[in-house]
Image (cartoon, rainbow, N blue to C red):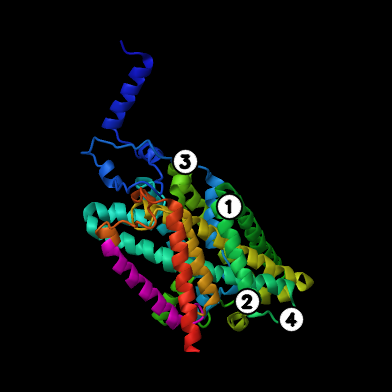
Amino acid sequence: MLTDRDSIAAQDNLSLKLYPDIDSIHHHRPVQSSLTKHRRISISSIVHPDSLKIVLPTDEVTLKRHLGLFSGICFIVGVIIGSGIFVSPKGVLQETQSVGLCLIIWIACGLVALLGALCYAEIGAVIPRNGAEVAYIKEGIGSVHKQIGDILAYVSSWAYTFILKPSGIAILILTFSQYFWSGIIEECELSEELIKMTAIFAILMLININSISVSIANRLNIIFVICKVLTILTVIIIGVIRLGKGYTQNLQNGFDGTTKNPLGVALAFYSGLWAYDGWNSLNLVTEELKNPKRDLWLSIVLALPAVIILYVLTNISYFTVMNKATLLTSDAVAVTWGEVVLGPVLRFLPILISVSALGSANGSLFGAARFCMVSAQYGYLPEVPIPLIIIIVLISIYLVLAPVITSPNIGYLFATIMILCGLVFYYPFVYRKIEWNIINFSKTSNVRKNDIVDFQFSLVISKIEHLGMMSQCSQ
Protein backbone atom coordinates (compact mmCIF):
# COMPACT_ATOMS: atom_id res chain seq x y z
CA MET A 1 0.00 0.00 0.00
CA LEU A 2 1.32 3.42 -0.99
CA THR A 3 2.10 5.91 1.72
CA ASP A 4 1.35 9.61 1.46
CA ARG A 5 4.99 10.32 0.65
CA ASP A 6 5.01 7.75 -2.15
CA SER A 7 1.81 9.13 -3.65
CA ILE A 8 3.17 12.68 -3.57
CA ALA A 9 6.41 11.56 -5.24
CA ALA A 10 4.44 9.71 -7.92
CA GLN A 11 2.35 12.80 -8.60
CA ASP A 12 5.49 14.94 -8.85
CA ASN A 13 7.07 12.51 -11.33
CA LEU A 14 3.89 12.46 -13.41
CA SER A 15 3.69 16.27 -13.45
CA LEU A 16 7.32 16.50 -14.53
CA LYS A 17 6.66 14.16 -17.43
CA LEU A 18 3.51 15.91 -18.59
CA TYR A 19 4.47 19.53 -17.87
CA PRO A 20 8.20 20.12 -18.14
CA ASP A 21 9.01 23.28 -16.22
CA ILE A 22 12.11 25.31 -16.92
CA ASP A 23 12.49 26.54 -13.35
CA SER A 24 12.65 23.02 -11.92
CA ILE A 25 15.15 21.97 -14.57
CA HIS A 26 17.26 25.03 -13.88
CA HIS A 27 17.15 24.52 -10.13
CA HIS A 28 18.65 21.04 -10.44
CA ARG A 29 21.13 21.85 -13.22
CA PRO A 30 24.57 21.30 -11.76
CA VAL A 31 27.76 23.26 -11.85
CA GLN A 32 30.35 20.90 -13.25
CA SER A 33 33.59 20.38 -11.45
CA SER A 34 36.99 20.24 -13.09
CA LEU A 35 37.05 16.44 -12.96
CA THR A 36 33.72 15.68 -14.63
CA LYS A 37 33.09 15.11 -18.29
CA HIS A 38 31.17 17.66 -20.30
CA ARG A 39 27.42 17.12 -20.36
CA ARG A 40 25.98 18.96 -23.33
CA ILE A 41 22.22 18.78 -22.77
CA SER A 42 20.42 21.38 -24.87
CA ILE A 43 17.69 23.25 -23.02
CA SER A 44 15.86 23.67 -26.31
CA SER A 45 15.50 19.90 -26.53
CA ILE A 46 14.44 19.62 -22.89
CA VAL A 47 11.55 22.03 -23.26
CA HIS A 48 10.42 20.67 -26.63
CA PRO A 49 6.74 19.71 -26.38
CA ASP A 50 7.40 16.29 -27.92
CA SER A 51 10.07 15.46 -25.35
CA LEU A 52 8.82 13.78 -22.17
CA LYS A 53 12.14 12.61 -20.71
CA ILE A 54 13.98 14.92 -18.37
CA VAL A 55 17.49 14.17 -17.18
CA LEU A 56 18.20 15.69 -13.79
CA PRO A 57 21.77 15.05 -12.61
CA THR A 58 21.88 15.00 -8.83
CA ASP A 59 25.56 14.36 -8.08
CA GLU A 60 26.74 17.95 -8.41
CA VAL A 61 26.18 21.28 -6.68
CA THR A 62 24.03 24.14 -7.97
CA LEU A 63 24.86 27.82 -7.71
CA LYS A 64 23.45 29.63 -4.71
CA ARG A 65 20.69 32.11 -5.50
CA HIS A 66 21.84 35.14 -3.53
CA LEU A 67 20.93 38.13 -5.76
CA GLY A 68 17.64 39.86 -5.05
CA LEU A 69 15.88 42.66 -6.90
CA PHE A 70 17.96 45.44 -5.37
CA SER A 71 21.20 43.56 -6.07
CA GLY A 72 20.11 43.04 -9.69
CA ILE A 73 19.39 46.75 -10.15
CA CYS A 74 22.72 47.68 -8.58
CA PHE A 75 24.55 45.18 -10.78
CA ILE A 76 23.16 46.70 -14.00
CA VAL A 77 23.69 50.30 -12.87
CA GLY A 78 27.16 49.49 -11.55
CA VAL A 79 28.39 48.00 -14.82
CA ILE A 80 26.83 50.66 -17.08
CA ILE A 81 27.90 53.76 -15.16
CA GLY A 82 31.68 53.82 -15.20
CA SER A 83 33.82 56.87 -15.80
CA GLY A 84 32.47 57.85 -19.23
CA ILE A 85 29.71 60.18 -18.05
CA PHE A 86 32.28 62.08 -15.96
CA VAL A 87 35.29 62.05 -18.27
CA SER A 88 34.22 62.07 -21.91
CA PRO A 89 30.48 62.55 -22.58
CA LYS A 90 31.40 64.81 -25.50
CA GLY A 91 31.34 62.16 -28.23
CA VAL A 92 27.62 62.64 -28.91
CA LEU A 93 27.88 66.45 -28.94
CA GLN A 94 30.90 66.33 -31.24
CA GLU A 95 28.89 64.50 -33.91
CA THR A 96 25.52 66.26 -33.51
CA GLN A 97 26.95 69.80 -33.15
CA SER A 98 23.92 70.94 -31.13
CA VAL A 99 22.74 70.66 -27.55
CA GLY A 100 19.15 69.75 -28.43
CA LEU A 101 19.96 66.87 -30.77
CA CYS A 102 22.66 65.73 -28.34
CA LEU A 103 20.12 65.26 -25.55
CA ILE A 104 17.68 63.54 -27.93
CA ILE A 105 20.39 61.06 -28.95
CA TRP A 106 21.16 60.32 -25.31
CA ILE A 107 17.49 59.47 -24.72
CA ALA A 108 17.19 57.46 -27.94
CA CYS A 109 20.30 55.41 -27.17
CA GLY A 110 18.92 54.64 -23.73
CA LEU A 111 15.64 53.45 -25.22
CA VAL A 112 17.52 51.22 -27.69
CA ALA A 113 19.51 49.75 -24.79
CA LEU A 114 16.27 49.22 -22.86
CA LEU A 115 14.67 47.37 -25.78
CA GLY A 116 17.76 45.20 -26.17
CA ALA A 117 17.76 44.43 -22.45
CA LEU A 118 14.08 43.45 -22.56
CA CYS A 119 14.80 41.09 -25.45
CA TYR A 120 17.58 39.55 -23.38
CA ALA A 121 15.18 39.23 -20.46
CA GLU A 122 12.78 37.30 -22.70
CA ILE A 123 15.56 34.98 -23.83
CA GLY A 124 16.75 34.62 -20.25
CA ALA A 125 13.29 33.46 -19.21
CA VAL A 126 13.41 30.68 -21.83
CA ILE A 127 17.09 29.82 -21.29
CA PRO A 128 17.67 30.54 -17.59
CA ARG A 129 21.43 30.07 -17.64
CA ASN A 130 24.43 32.17 -16.75
CA GLY A 131 26.71 33.33 -19.54
CA ALA A 132 24.28 35.40 -21.64
CA GLU A 133 25.53 35.32 -25.25
CA VAL A 134 27.44 32.05 -25.14
CA ALA A 135 24.44 30.19 -23.67
CA TYR A 136 21.94 31.82 -26.01
CA ILE A 137 24.02 31.12 -29.12
CA LYS A 138 24.68 27.54 -28.08
CA GLU A 139 21.09 26.75 -27.09
CA GLY A 140 19.41 28.86 -29.77
CA ILE A 141 21.45 28.42 -32.94
CA GLY A 142 22.73 25.06 -31.73
CA SER A 143 19.20 23.68 -31.60
CA VAL A 144 18.89 24.37 -35.35
CA HIS A 145 22.42 23.45 -36.44
CA LYS A 146 24.69 22.02 -33.75
CA GLN A 147 28.04 22.59 -35.48
CA ILE A 148 27.32 26.22 -36.41
CA GLY A 149 26.06 26.86 -32.89
CA ASP A 150 29.24 25.38 -31.43
CA ILE A 151 31.50 27.44 -33.69
CA LEU A 152 29.72 30.74 -33.05
CA ALA A 153 29.46 30.13 -29.31
CA TYR A 154 33.12 29.16 -29.13
CA VAL A 155 34.29 32.25 -31.02
CA SER A 156 32.09 34.37 -28.76
CA SER A 157 33.56 32.82 -25.61
CA TRP A 158 37.12 33.13 -26.91
CA ALA A 159 36.74 36.79 -27.94
CA TYR A 160 34.99 37.68 -24.68
CA THR A 161 37.49 35.91 -22.44
CA PHE A 162 40.72 36.90 -24.14
CA ILE A 163 39.94 40.25 -25.81
CA LEU A 164 36.76 42.14 -24.92
CA LYS A 165 36.64 41.73 -21.16
CA PRO A 166 40.39 42.15 -20.42
CA SER A 167 40.58 45.32 -22.54
CA GLY A 168 37.49 46.80 -20.87
CA ILE A 169 38.82 46.05 -17.40
CA ALA A 170 42.22 47.52 -18.29
CA ILE A 171 40.68 50.80 -19.48
CA LEU A 172 38.51 51.13 -16.36
CA ILE A 173 41.38 50.32 -14.01
CA LEU A 174 43.72 52.80 -15.71
CA THR A 175 41.02 55.46 -15.40
CA PHE A 176 40.63 54.62 -11.72
CA SER A 177 44.35 54.89 -11.06
CA GLN A 178 44.80 58.17 -12.92
CA TYR A 179 41.89 59.98 -11.28
CA PHE A 180 42.59 58.55 -7.85
CA TRP A 181 46.09 59.99 -7.75
CA SER A 182 45.06 63.25 -9.44
CA GLY A 183 42.67 63.80 -6.53
CA ILE A 184 45.42 63.18 -3.98
CA ILE A 185 48.45 64.74 -5.67
CA GLU A 186 47.56 68.13 -7.14
CA GLU A 187 50.77 69.96 -7.87
CA CYS A 188 53.14 67.18 -8.93
CA GLU A 189 52.94 65.50 -12.31
CA LEU A 190 51.86 61.89 -12.06
CA SER A 191 54.41 59.33 -13.17
CA GLU A 192 53.36 56.59 -15.55
CA GLU A 193 54.91 53.95 -13.29
CA LEU A 194 52.80 55.05 -10.32
CA ILE A 195 49.58 54.92 -12.36
CA LYS A 196 50.31 51.46 -13.77
CA MET A 197 51.44 49.93 -10.48
CA THR A 198 48.31 51.22 -8.76
CA ALA A 199 46.20 49.78 -11.59
CA ILE A 200 47.85 46.37 -11.20
CA PHE A 201 47.27 46.45 -7.44
CA ALA A 202 43.58 47.28 -8.01
CA ILE A 203 43.16 44.38 -10.46
CA LEU A 204 44.74 41.93 -8.03
CA MET A 205 42.57 43.25 -5.20
CA LEU A 206 39.38 42.73 -7.23
CA ILE A 207 40.30 39.22 -8.34
CA ASN A 208 41.02 38.22 -4.74
CA ILE A 209 37.68 39.58 -3.53
CA ASN A 210 35.72 37.88 -6.33
CA SER A 211 37.55 34.58 -5.85
CA ILE A 212 37.24 34.44 -2.06
CA SER A 213 33.62 35.52 -1.46
CA VAL A 214 30.73 36.15 -3.83
CA SER A 215 28.68 37.87 -1.13
CA ILE A 216 31.49 40.31 -0.34
CA ALA A 217 31.89 41.10 -4.04
CA ASN A 218 28.14 41.75 -4.29
CA ARG A 219 28.14 44.01 -1.23
CA LEU A 220 31.16 45.87 -2.56
CA ASN A 221 29.33 46.40 -5.85
CA ILE A 222 26.33 47.86 -3.99
CA ILE A 223 28.62 50.25 -2.10
CA PHE A 224 30.23 51.37 -5.36
CA VAL A 225 26.82 51.97 -6.94
CA ILE A 226 25.63 54.06 -4.00
CA CYS A 227 28.79 56.20 -4.21
CA LYS A 228 28.52 56.81 -7.95
CA VAL A 229 24.78 57.54 -7.85
CA LEU A 230 25.29 60.02 -5.01
CA THR A 231 28.04 61.69 -7.06
CA ILE A 232 25.77 62.00 -10.10
CA LEU A 233 22.89 63.27 -7.97
CA THR A 234 25.21 65.96 -6.58
CA VAL A 235 26.02 67.09 -10.12
CA ILE A 236 22.32 67.06 -11.04
CA ILE A 237 21.17 68.98 -7.95
CA ILE A 238 23.76 71.70 -8.52
CA GLY A 239 22.65 71.88 -12.15
CA VAL A 240 19.00 72.29 -11.13
CA ILE A 241 19.98 75.08 -8.74
CA ARG A 242 21.88 76.85 -11.50
CA LEU A 243 18.90 76.50 -13.84
CA GLY A 244 16.76 78.14 -11.18
CA LYS A 245 19.24 81.00 -11.02
CA GLY A 246 18.90 81.58 -14.76
CA TYR A 247 21.99 79.87 -16.20
CA THR A 248 20.13 78.74 -19.31
CA GLN A 249 22.05 80.56 -22.03
CA ASN A 250 23.67 77.37 -23.34
CA LEU A 251 20.30 75.58 -23.50
CA GLN A 252 18.47 78.31 -25.41
CA ASN A 253 18.30 77.82 -29.17
CA GLY A 254 19.50 74.29 -28.52
CA PHE A 255 19.22 73.15 -32.14
CA ASP A 256 21.46 75.84 -33.61
CA GLY A 257 24.24 74.33 -35.71
CA THR A 258 22.67 70.86 -35.86
CA THR A 259 24.50 68.60 -38.26
CA LYS A 260 22.76 67.68 -41.50
CA ASN A 261 25.05 64.76 -42.18
CA PRO A 262 23.36 61.36 -41.56
CA LEU A 263 26.78 59.88 -40.88
CA GLY A 264 27.22 62.28 -37.98
CA VAL A 265 23.94 61.12 -36.44
CA ALA A 266 24.99 57.49 -36.87
CA LEU A 267 28.33 58.15 -35.18
CA ALA A 268 26.51 59.97 -32.39
CA PHE A 269 24.37 56.86 -31.83
CA TYR A 270 27.55 54.80 -31.75
CA SER A 271 29.06 56.99 -29.03
CA GLY A 272 25.82 57.05 -27.06
CA LEU A 273 25.29 53.30 -27.17
CA TRP A 274 28.86 52.81 -25.96
CA ALA A 275 27.94 54.78 -22.82
CA TYR A 276 25.10 52.31 -22.15
CA ASP A 277 27.34 49.27 -22.57
CA GLY A 278 26.52 46.76 -19.85
CA TRP A 279 22.74 46.74 -20.32
CA ASN A 280 22.93 42.94 -20.78
CA SER A 281 25.15 42.35 -17.75
CA LEU A 282 22.48 40.83 -15.50
CA ASN A 283 21.97 37.97 -17.96
CA LEU A 284 25.48 36.83 -17.09
CA VAL A 285 24.27 35.92 -13.57
CA THR A 286 20.70 34.75 -14.25
CA GLU A 287 21.15 31.53 -12.29
CA GLU A 288 22.07 33.46 -9.14
CA LEU A 289 18.87 35.53 -9.02
CA LYS A 290 16.51 34.48 -6.25
CA ASN A 291 13.48 34.84 -8.52
CA PRO A 292 14.75 35.07 -12.12
CA LYS A 293 11.28 35.19 -13.71
CA ARG A 294 10.46 38.35 -11.80
CA ASP A 295 13.79 39.93 -10.90
CA LEU A 296 15.42 39.73 -14.34
CA TRP A 297 12.93 41.84 -16.27
CA LEU A 298 11.98 44.02 -13.29
CA SER A 299 15.62 44.92 -12.61
CA ILE A 300 16.01 45.92 -16.25
CA VAL A 301 12.80 47.96 -16.29
CA LEU A 302 13.88 49.85 -13.17
CA ALA A 303 17.62 50.20 -13.85
CA LEU A 304 17.74 51.30 -17.51
CA PRO A 305 15.23 54.19 -17.22
CA ALA A 306 17.07 55.34 -14.09
CA VAL A 307 20.36 55.40 -16.00
CA ILE A 308 18.72 57.31 -18.88
CA ILE A 309 17.39 59.97 -16.50
CA LEU A 310 20.74 60.27 -14.72
CA TYR A 311 22.65 60.61 -18.00
CA VAL A 312 20.34 63.25 -19.49
CA LEU A 313 20.14 65.36 -16.33
CA THR A 314 23.92 65.17 -15.89
CA ASN A 315 24.45 66.49 -19.41
CA ILE A 316 21.98 69.31 -18.76
CA SER A 317 23.93 70.17 -15.60
CA TYR A 318 27.13 70.33 -17.64
CA PHE A 319 25.50 72.76 -20.08
CA THR A 320 24.57 75.10 -17.24
CA VAL A 321 28.30 75.70 -16.79
CA MET A 322 29.94 75.07 -20.19
CA ASN A 323 29.05 75.98 -23.72
CA LYS A 324 29.62 73.68 -26.69
CA ALA A 325 33.17 74.86 -27.38
CA THR A 326 34.31 74.50 -23.77
CA LEU A 327 32.81 71.04 -23.40
CA LEU A 328 34.36 69.78 -26.63
CA THR A 329 37.84 70.99 -25.66
CA SER A 330 37.71 69.61 -22.11
CA ASP A 331 39.78 66.52 -21.32
CA ALA A 332 37.65 65.73 -18.25
CA VAL A 333 34.20 67.31 -18.47
CA ALA A 334 33.23 66.73 -14.83
CA VAL A 335 36.48 68.26 -13.58
CA THR A 336 36.00 71.33 -15.81
CA TRP A 337 32.45 71.61 -14.48
CA GLY A 338 33.71 71.26 -10.90
CA GLU A 339 36.28 74.03 -11.31
CA VAL A 340 33.41 76.49 -11.73
CA VAL A 341 30.91 75.29 -9.12
CA LEU A 342 32.77 73.30 -6.46
CA GLY A 343 35.72 75.49 -5.57
CA PRO A 344 37.97 73.92 -2.88
CA VAL A 345 35.85 70.76 -2.80
CA LEU A 346 36.99 70.02 -6.36
CA ARG A 347 39.82 67.76 -5.23
CA PHE A 348 37.30 65.13 -4.03
CA LEU A 349 35.61 64.86 -7.44
CA PRO A 350 38.46 62.92 -9.16
CA ILE A 351 38.45 60.44 -6.27
CA LEU A 352 34.71 59.88 -6.71
CA ILE A 353 35.24 59.40 -10.46
CA SER A 354 37.91 56.80 -9.70
CA VAL A 355 35.52 54.97 -7.36
CA SER A 356 32.94 54.87 -10.16
CA ALA A 357 35.46 53.35 -12.58
CA LEU A 358 36.60 50.79 -9.99
CA GLY A 359 33.01 49.76 -9.31
CA SER A 360 32.35 49.18 -12.99
CA ALA A 361 35.51 47.06 -13.21
CA ASN A 362 34.36 45.01 -10.22
CA GLY A 363 30.99 44.30 -11.86
CA SER A 364 32.68 43.39 -15.14
CA LEU A 365 34.99 40.92 -13.41
CA PHE A 366 32.04 39.45 -11.48
CA GLY A 367 30.19 38.77 -14.73
CA ALA A 368 33.31 37.52 -16.51
CA ALA A 369 33.70 34.75 -13.94
CA ARG A 370 30.21 33.44 -14.76
CA PHE A 371 30.83 33.68 -18.49
CA CYS A 372 33.99 31.58 -18.16
CA MET A 373 32.17 29.03 -16.01
CA VAL A 374 29.41 28.49 -18.58
CA SER A 375 31.92 28.36 -21.44
CA ALA A 376 33.77 25.64 -19.53
CA GLN A 377 30.53 23.71 -18.98
CA TYR A 378 29.98 23.65 -22.73
CA GLY A 379 33.56 22.48 -23.26
CA TYR A 380 34.81 25.65 -24.96
CA LEU A 381 37.29 26.40 -22.16
CA PRO A 382 39.03 24.18 -19.60
CA GLU A 383 36.86 23.51 -16.53
CA VAL A 384 39.01 25.44 -14.09
CA PRO A 385 37.00 28.58 -13.18
CA ILE A 386 39.50 30.43 -10.97
CA PRO A 387 42.52 29.89 -13.30
CA LEU A 388 40.42 31.19 -16.20
CA ILE A 389 39.68 34.40 -14.30
CA ILE A 390 43.40 34.62 -13.54
CA ILE A 391 44.02 34.45 -17.30
CA ILE A 392 41.66 37.40 -17.80
CA VAL A 393 43.49 39.26 -15.04
CA LEU A 394 46.91 38.52 -16.56
CA ILE A 395 45.79 39.78 -19.97
CA SER A 396 44.35 42.89 -18.32
CA ILE A 397 47.68 43.49 -16.56
CA TYR A 398 49.47 43.03 -19.88
CA LEU A 399 47.20 45.62 -21.48
CA VAL A 400 47.88 47.97 -18.56
CA LEU A 401 51.64 47.66 -19.01
CA ALA A 402 51.80 47.44 -22.81
CA PRO A 403 50.90 50.36 -25.12
CA VAL A 404 48.19 48.33 -26.87
CA ILE A 405 45.29 50.52 -25.75
CA THR A 406 47.02 53.74 -26.80
CA SER A 407 47.90 52.31 -30.24
CA PRO A 408 44.68 51.32 -32.03
CA ASN A 409 46.40 49.67 -34.97
CA ILE A 410 48.32 47.32 -32.69
CA GLY A 411 45.12 46.66 -30.78
CA TYR A 412 43.20 45.61 -33.89
CA LEU A 413 46.09 43.37 -34.95
CA PHE A 414 46.21 41.82 -31.48
CA ALA A 415 42.46 41.14 -31.53
CA THR A 416 42.59 39.58 -35.00
CA ILE A 417 45.48 37.29 -34.09
CA MET A 418 43.76 36.12 -30.91
CA ILE A 419 40.51 35.29 -32.74
CA LEU A 420 42.40 33.37 -35.43
CA CYS A 421 44.29 31.46 -32.75
CA GLY A 422 40.96 30.60 -31.19
CA LEU A 423 39.70 29.18 -34.48
CA VAL A 424 42.88 27.12 -34.81
CA PHE A 425 42.38 25.66 -31.32
CA TYR A 426 38.70 24.97 -32.00
CA TYR A 427 39.18 21.99 -34.32
CA PRO A 428 41.41 19.75 -32.16
CA PHE A 429 40.12 20.61 -28.71
CA VAL A 430 36.40 21.29 -29.26
CA TYR A 431 35.35 19.63 -32.50
CA ARG A 432 37.63 16.57 -32.23
CA LYS A 433 37.25 16.45 -28.41
CA ILE A 434 40.97 16.03 -27.71
CA GLU A 435 41.47 15.99 -23.93
CA TRP A 436 43.44 18.69 -22.09
CA ASN A 437 45.46 16.08 -20.20
CA ILE A 438 47.70 18.67 -18.53
CA ILE A 439 44.69 20.17 -16.78
CA ASN A 440 42.42 17.13 -16.36
CA PHE A 441 44.10 14.89 -13.77
CA SER A 442 41.45 12.20 -14.06
CA LYS A 443 43.38 10.64 -16.98
CA THR A 444 46.60 10.35 -14.95
CA SER A 445 45.81 7.56 -12.54
CA ASN A 446 49.38 6.23 -12.34
CA VAL A 447 51.06 9.58 -11.83
CA ARG A 448 50.81 11.74 -8.75
CA LYS A 449 49.31 15.22 -9.25
CA ASN A 450 52.22 16.84 -7.43
CA ASP A 451 54.66 15.23 -9.86
CA ILE A 452 52.79 16.74 -12.80
CA VAL A 453 52.75 20.19 -11.20
CA ASP A 454 56.46 19.92 -10.39
CA PHE A 455 57.18 18.87 -13.97
CA GLN A 456 55.22 21.80 -15.40
CA PHE A 457 56.92 24.23 -13.02
CA SER A 458 60.39 22.93 -13.90
CA LEU A 459 59.51 23.10 -17.59
CA VAL A 460 58.51 26.76 -17.28
CA ILE A 461 61.67 27.57 -15.32
CA SER A 462 63.85 25.86 -17.93
CA LYS A 463 62.16 27.84 -20.70
CA ILE A 464 62.75 31.10 -18.82
CA GLU A 465 66.41 30.21 -18.27
CA HIS A 466 66.74 29.29 -21.94
CA LEU A 467 65.31 32.65 -23.00
CA GLY A 468 67.67 34.41 -20.60
CA MET A 469 70.68 32.62 -22.08
CA MET A 470 69.53 33.53 -25.60
CA SER A 471 69.18 37.20 -24.65
CA GLN A 472 72.68 37.22 -23.12
CA CYS A 473 74.12 35.60 -26.22
CA SER A 474 72.42 38.15 -28.45
CA GLN A 475 73.98 40.96 -26.40
Which one is in front in this view, the residue at disc 3 or the one at disc 1?
A: 1
Identify which residue is drawn at 60% across, 71% down: 175
Secondary structure, magenta segment, majority class = helix
Q: Position of residue 293 (x, y in %)?
A: 43, 43
Which one is in front in this view, the residue at disc 2 or the one at disc 4?
A: 4
**Of callouts 2 and 4, which one flags the residue occurring earlier in the amino acid sequence?**
4
**Of callouts 3 and 1, which one flags the residue occurring earlier in the amino acid sequence?**
1
Residue to which mark 3 is pinned: 291
* Span of residues in magenta: 405-428
Identify which residue is drawn at 63% across, 61% down: 228
Q: Is residue 412 on the magenta stretch?
A: yes
* Label 3 – label 2 distance at C-alpha: 40 Å
**Of callouts 4 and 3, which one flags the residue occurring earlier in the amino acid sequence?**
4
Residue to which mark 4 is pinned: 188
Residue 309 visible at all: no
Above or below, 475 relative to 318: below
**Of callouts 1 and 4, which one flags the residue occurring earlier in the amino acid sequence?**
4
* Label 1 – label 4 distance at C-alpha: 34 Å
Q: Which amino acid type corresponds to the residue marked 2 in the rendered image?
A: Ala
Give the quadrant of the N terminus: top left
The one nearer the camera, 13 or 166, is 166
Outermost residue, top side: 1
* Label 2 – label 4 distance at C-alpha: 18 Å
* Label 1 – label 2 distance at C-alpha: 29 Å
Circle 2 SS class: loop
Identify which residue is drawn at 57% across, 47% down: 215
Residue 416 visible at all: yes
Residue to which mark 2 is pinned: 332
